[in-house]
Amino acid sequence: MILTRRTLMLGATATLAGCDRLARNPSFREALFSAENFHKWAQRSLMARDALAQEFRADQISPIFRANGTANPNTPAYKAYWRNGFADWRLKVGGLVARPLSLSLSQLRAMPHREQITRHDCVEGWSAIGKWGGVPLRTILDGAGMSSRARYIVFRCADDMGGGRLYYESIDLTDAFHPQTILAFALNDRPLSVANGAPLRLRVERQLGYKHAKYLMEIEVTDSLRAIGRGKGGFWEDHADYDWYAGI
């Protein structure tokens, strides 16, 4: 088929007309121009979906990498894992998958992994540069065999936020399959410390620090966030009205 200039103009006119009709719809305008959705739309429209967050040189690594969020879960279960070097700890992967997984730390360390020197930006206003090493999340999801119904990845953690409420977070498939999204087991060429999320934490480098869930225990593949916590997709989103999409 040969696309003439007139054909292209007609197509563009039809598209704009459709957009104009949508723009006059109050529900569409409210959804599109909410701060969070507009932020997400703008970032992903202006950048390629696999565009990398800035990476740095080794000599730019921060001398101290502060702990964000919880510095130690300090629960009986977590302390038991820590005392034996996390030998009994397992990362469970379930939900909408063909092959549920239960992975030890040694199995994760034996997988092909990625190293990246990136900047962590905390919602509290501080930043630090660190070298992370870990398994691409995509490797784990491919191994589990996600359902075509999958839309979100939920991370359940060991840190107790009070009253037995354990931390949780979620991302969509665009961020889950991003090349810099890893399950990190090392920081600056050393195993993660307790303060920085041992034995395993999420690094989703194009989002703010509260999305980088620490003390990972379980990954759930799901088609909806409605049944996760209070339905907003994350602990701080549910309890402090943080934006679910925290792209930077």
Image (cartoon, rainbow, N blue to C red):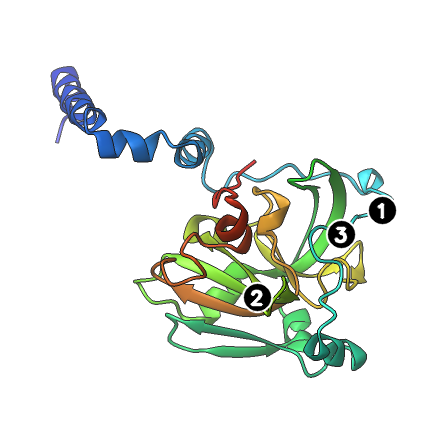
Instruction: Point out residue 96 in the picture as x, y percentages from the top left corner.
Output: 37, 70
Nearer to us of marks 1 and 3 is 3
Instruction: Point out residue 72 in the picture as x, y percentages from the top left corner.
Output: 75, 64
Which mark is first along the chain, 2 or 1? 1
Instruction: Point out residue 5 in the picture as x, y percentages from the top left corner.
Output: 16, 16
Nearer to us of marks 3 and 2 is 2
The residue most toward the front is 163
Dot 3: what SS?
A: loop
Q: In this view, does 118 lie to the left or right of 223?
A: right
Residue at 71% across, 50% down? 68
On-image quarter of the C terminus: top right
- Identify the residue under disc 3: 67
Q: Distance between the residues labelled 1 and 2?
A: 30 Å
Residue 229, picture quadrant: bottom left
The type of residue carrying mark 2 is Arg
- Identify the residue under disc 1: 64
Classify mark 2: residues with Cα within 10 Å, few (<14), some (14-19) or many (20+).
few
Q: Distance between the residues labelled 1 and 3?
A: 9 Å
- Identify the residue under disc 2: 165
Report whether residue 115 is seen.
yes
